[in-house]
Amino acid sequence: MKDLREVKKILQMEISRHRSTCNLWLSQENYILKMLERFNMTEVRSVSTSLAGHFRLSSSQCPNSQEEENEMSQVPFASAVRSLMYVIVCTRLDLPYTVGLVSQFMLNLGKQCWEAVKLVLRYLRGIVGLGLVFQRLKTENFKVLQVYVDADYGGDLDQ
């Protein structure tokens, strides 16, 4: 067995540990920057929300002609969604609803859905430096759990 010292990076996650404050920081800044570069989104203007309220995705927006299907088959949609899913699993816990919504259209992609994915990438462009912070509580009471949810399944047009 060999001691490789303190871990700084694993599986595209940067790890920073601050012993004095008992904080552990996880970030995927470099991975997200590479992802934005791969999908030509490095120079786009960022947005403040991952999916704006005006986006209503539905199966009725899927391609209706062979020409539309051929055009949308050239879009790297599946690759973008897979990259976003990896970001969700590791550090971006604010994106599961949005990415789950767009991933429903993996097999029958419409232009509106691709626009929604590009909007998520623009959102990531604005928050690329954020990550997860784990810190030790000063209290002995470990029953503190804070959860915030903002999901709109009532706005799903296909249900």
Image (cartoon, rainbow, N blue to C red):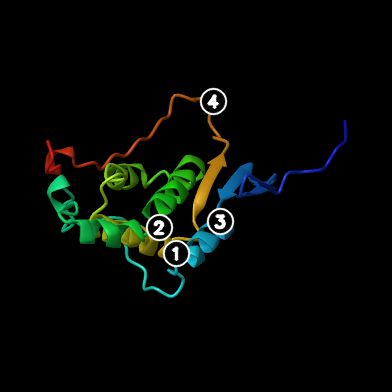
* Residue 19 in the image, given as x and y percentages of width and height: 70, 44
Callout 1: few (<14), some (14-19), or many (20+) C-alpha neighbours within 10 Å?
Answer: some
Q: Secondary structure at mark 4?
A: loop
Are there few (<14), some (14-19), or many (20+) residues within 10 Å of tag 4? few
Residue located 35% across and 35% down the image: 147
Tell me, for residue 76, which label it has, or none: 2
Amino acid type, mark 3: Tyr
Of marks 4 and 2, which one's residue comes earlier in the chain?
2
In this figure, which residue is indicated by the disc labeled 1? Answer: 39
Say which quadrant the C terminus sits in.
Answer: top left
Q: Quadrant of residue 65?
A: bottom left
* Residue 120 in sight here: yes
Say left or right for 12 vs 106: right
Q: Secondary structure at mark 1?
A: loop
Which residue corresponds to the image point at 12% horizontal and 49% vertical from the top-left?
Answer: 60
Q: Earlier in the sequence, mark 3 or mark 4?
A: 3
Is residue 103 toward the left or the right of residue 63 in the image? right
Query: Viewed as shown, does residue 114 lie left or right of 19?
Result: left
What type is the residue that disc 4 sits on? Glu
Q: For the residue labelled by badge 2, is the local secondary structure a helix, a strand or a loop?
A: loop
Of 51 and 127, the residue lying toward us: 51
The residue identified by callout 4 is: 140
Q: Amino acid at mark 1?
A: Phe
Q: Are marks 2 and 1 in contact (CB under 8 Å)?
A: yes
Residue 21: image location, x then y, percent: 63, 46
Choose the circle earlier in sequence order: 2 or 3: 3
Q: Which residue is mark 3?
A: 31
